[in-house]
Structure formats: structure tokens, C-alpha cells
Image (cartoon, rainbow, N blue to C red):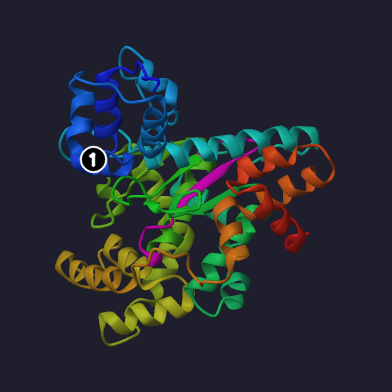
């Protein structure tokens, strides 16, 4: 039986990185809590097979367990999140989807360059010195957020689907994932992040945390688009209990204002608020007008001082609690969910390159997080 000469404190690091107790970590690896504890105390060593299982269950490369000290896991994007208390290290789930998105984005950039695609002219088109209304208007015009889009949508869920589709036609990859790859046991934590944007003229990317409240996802998409328009990549986790002007980070505060203006232009909103006798009826009326969720309308009314903080909190809690769902909006079969998670534009570009022999089936399966058998089945259904 071959012992693995792993470093005890790296075993502890791998366990605490996943926020697991010794008994729970031990159960995942298939050993007793006493055995696992003896590994951490350097009183015994795991076998090579046990070390491999430990690395697999703790979602770390096996080589990490042999390091002399824990690796420093820095986020590869600017972090605009503000949280109370001491900063927390990123979760393994967050890091895994972030690096997965970066791999997809790297491939798509190379693909676009080989195809001699034109760079996206809207990336870094504006800055923090420009007007919120000017930027929002340009985003609406470029993406096509207009009366025609609103008329096409029967409800806000249709609007979100169309909003994503129109965004991708402009060259922006939009990924919506609620867990890591296809592992439904590794859910993303919306308290950790709502989304992120990667500003790149050849391969801009937006990621939406699909564990978020369904009603908030339209706003998250608009917010991340604003990040692209001012050329600011970053990770966001807006506090929706606050107004746009109350967000703590300067860039997120600015993008929050832009997102609100994209979806519900202030001048138009003020003109139509108050037509109905109650707050609820005004909200429902403007939901029908803009085809956005009640949450977006409610938050805009609060931003514009059309309702009080107390009124906002009352409706905010009711709307969000009523609409939380870990599944992508609209349901659908595997293929639809598959395209949500990987971006429709990315998926078809990759499958097309695979058919043409420009990328191997193995690499395509890895980028799409599926097994070879599933990839072939997906290819046959989608192409």
C-alpha cells in the first residue's frame, strides 16, 4: 500500500476551503473522522488512492496537496463586491465557474480573431465622466431594447430571453449558471456574487448567477452590459435593498444607475407613474408597459423617490420571496438549459469549429463540461 507524502496542513486547507467539518470531509472521502483527523495532525498518511479521492472531493488538483504552503487564490477580475465583516476567500464553486468562463472566453477570442471578426465598437465607448442617460440610450439602441422588443414579449420572462438573444447577436457571450458544470450538488451562492463581466473587444462575456431571484436577472444583465460599455471588467454583488445611489462601490453604483435607465427611462417612468390608484396597480401597469419584472419597476420607483423606504421594503420582500427559483426561467429541456449555461453563441461557434476539424472533440467536450457521448448526441440534435 503506497502512502501519499502529502502535506498535512494542505489537507486542512482543502477541507476548510470547502467549509467542511472533519466528520463531513471524512464521509466524502470514505474514511472515519478519526482517520481524517490523524492525517491533519500528521499522525498518519493517506494512501495514494485516498489522496486522489480527497483531491477529487475537495475540488483541488492532487498536486496542491504536496505543496509546502497553501496557494494564494487571487481573483483574476476586479472585485466590486462589498461585504460586511472580514473579507472571505472565494468559494471553490465560484472559482471553478469563473475560470471555466475565462477558458470559454479565451477560446472564443481566438475563434473571433481567426474568423477576422470586427471588434465590438461599444467596449470602452464611454467612461465614468459620461452621462448615465447617454450611455443607457446607446445600450438600448445597440442591443435593441425598444418598443418592438417589448411588444414581442408576452411577459418579463420572454423579455429576458429576447434581451439575452439580442445581446448575443452583438457578440457578447451570456452564460447563465446556477451550479458548477452539470453538478447540481455544487450550487453557486448568490450571497457571494450575482454576476460578472469580462470587457474584451473581441470576446466580451457576461455571467449571470442563475441561483439569484428570477425577477432580478433582467437587472443583472443590464448592469453587466453597463460594465462593458465603460470597459470595466469585474465581479458584482449588488445590494438590492439599497437605491442605486447607495451602492458602496463607485463603478457598481454608476452601472446600477445605467441599468435602471436602460430598462425604465426616468422621464418616461415618471410620466406614467401615478395613473393607477395604488402602488401595486402602478407597478402592474408599468410591468405591462416595460415587460420587466415587478422587482425592476419597484426598485425604479424607489430610486426616483416615488415610494418610501418602508413601502419599498414591504413589496421587495414579497416579490423576491415569491419568485426565487434555482432553475433557469422558462424551463425547457436539456438542450435549452445547455445553451443557457454555455451561451448559445459560444456553443454553436464551438460545435461548428469541431465539425470543421478546427477543434478536437475532446477539447470541445471539456469546454462544454460534458462527456464525449453526450457531446455527440448534442451535436446531432443542434446541428
Q: Is residue 301 left or right of residue 267?
A: left
In the image, the segment drawn in magenta is: 198-215
Query: Which residue is situated farthest in the bottom direction here?
Result: 277
Residue closer to the observer: 353 or 202:
353
Q: How many marks?
A: 1
Residue 323, located in which quarter of the rendered image? bottom left
> How far across and down, in percent of the image, does residue 29 sit?
32, 39
**From this viewpoint, is residue 168 visible?**
yes
User: In which quadrant of the rendered image does the C terminus lie?
Assistant: bottom right
> How far across and down, in percent of the image, does residue 2 sit?
40, 20
User: In which quadrant of the rendered image does the N terminus lie?
Assistant: top left
The verdict on residue 199 being magenta is: yes
Tell me the residue at 40%/63% (across/down).
266
Residue 212, located in which quarter of the rendered image? bottom left
Residue linked to disc 1: 20
> How far across and down, in percent of the image, does residue 258 sit?
43, 51
Tell me the residue at 28%/49% (across/down).
191
Q: Is residue 35 left or right of residue 101?
A: left
Q: Residues within 10 Å of mark 1 (few under 14, many from 20)?
A: some
Query: Which residue is situated farthest in the right direction here?
Result: 356
Residue closer to the observer: 74 or 13:
13
Q: Is residue 62 above or below residue 281?
A: above
The verdict on residue 245 being magenta is: no
Residue 68, located in which quarter of the rendered image? top left
Tell me the residue at 34%/45% (across/down).
253
Q: Is residue 184 above or below residue 77?
A: below
> How far across and down, in percent of the image, does residue 292 sit?
45, 70
**From this viewpoint, is residue 130 visible?**
no
Query: Which residue is situated farthest in the top direction here?
Result: 68
Residue closer to the observer: 32 or 169:
32
Q: Secondary structure at mark 1?
A: loop
Amino acid at each position: 500500500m503506497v502512502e501519499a507524502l502529502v502535506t498535512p496542513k494542505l489537507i486542512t486547507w482543502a477541507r476548510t476551503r470547502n467549509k467542511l467539518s472533519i466528520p463531513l470531509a471524512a464521509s466524502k472521502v470514505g474514511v472515519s473522522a478519526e482517520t481524517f483527523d490523524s492525517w491533519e495532525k500528521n499522525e498518519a498518511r493517506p494512501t495514494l488512492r485516498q489522496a486522489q479521492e480527497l483531491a477529487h472531493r475537495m475540488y483541488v488538483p492532487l498536486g496542491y496537496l504536496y505543496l509546502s504552503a497553501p496557494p494564494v487564490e487571487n481573483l483574476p477580475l476586479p472585485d466590486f463586491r462589498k461585504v460586511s465583516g472580514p473579507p472571505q476567500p472565494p468559494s471553490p464553486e465560484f472559482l471553478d465557474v469563473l475560470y471555466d468562463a475565462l477558458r470559454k472566453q479565451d477560446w472564443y477570442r481566438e475563434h473571433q480573431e481567426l474568423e477576422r471578426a470586427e471588434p465590438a465598437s461599444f467596449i470602452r465607448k464611454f467612461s465614468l465622466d459620461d452621462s448615465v442617460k447617454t450611455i443607457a440610450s446607446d445600450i438600448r439602441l445597440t442591443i435593441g431594447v425598444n418598443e418592438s422588443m417589448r411588444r414581442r414579449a408576452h411577459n418579463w420572462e420572454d423579455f429576458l430571453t429576447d434581451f439575452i438573444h439580442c445581446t448575443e447577436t452583438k457578440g457578447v457571450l451570456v452564460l447563465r449558471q446556477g451550479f458548477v458544470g452539470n453538478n447540481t450538488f455544487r450550487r453557486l451562492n448568490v450571497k457571494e456574487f450575482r454576476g460578472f463581466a469580462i470587457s474584451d473587444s473581441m470576446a466580451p462575456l457576461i455571467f449571470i448567477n442563475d441561483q439569484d431571484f428570477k425577477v432580478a436577472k433582467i437587472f443583472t444583465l443590464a448592469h453587466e452590459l453597463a460594465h462593458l460599455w465603460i470597459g470595466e471588467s469585474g465581479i458584482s454583488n449588488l445590494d438590492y435593498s439599497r437605491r442605486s445611489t447607495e451602492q458602496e462601490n463607485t463603478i457598481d453604483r454608476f452601472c446600477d444607475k445605467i441599468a435602471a435607465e436602460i430598462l425604465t427611462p426616468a422621464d418616461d417612468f415618471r410620466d406614467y407613474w401615478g395613473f393607477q390608484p395604488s402602488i401595486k396597480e402602478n407597478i402592474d401597469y408599468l410591468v405591462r408597459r416595460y415587460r420587466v419584472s415587478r422587482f425592476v419597476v419597484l426598485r425604479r420607483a424607489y430610486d426616483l423617490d416615488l415610494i418610501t423606504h418602508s413601502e419599498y421594503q414591504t413589496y421587495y420582500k414579497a416579490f423576491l420571496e415569491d419568485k426565487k427559483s434555482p432553475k433557469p426561467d422558462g424551463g425547457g429541456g436539456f438542450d435549452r438549459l445547455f445553451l443557457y449555461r454555455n451561451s448559445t453563441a459560444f456553443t454553436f461557434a464551438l460545435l461548428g469549429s469541431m465539425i470543421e476539424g478546427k477543434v478536437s472533440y475532446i477539447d470541445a467536450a471539456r469546454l462544454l463540461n460534458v462527456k464525449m457521448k453526450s457531446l455527440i448526441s448534442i451535436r446531432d440534435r443542434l446541428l
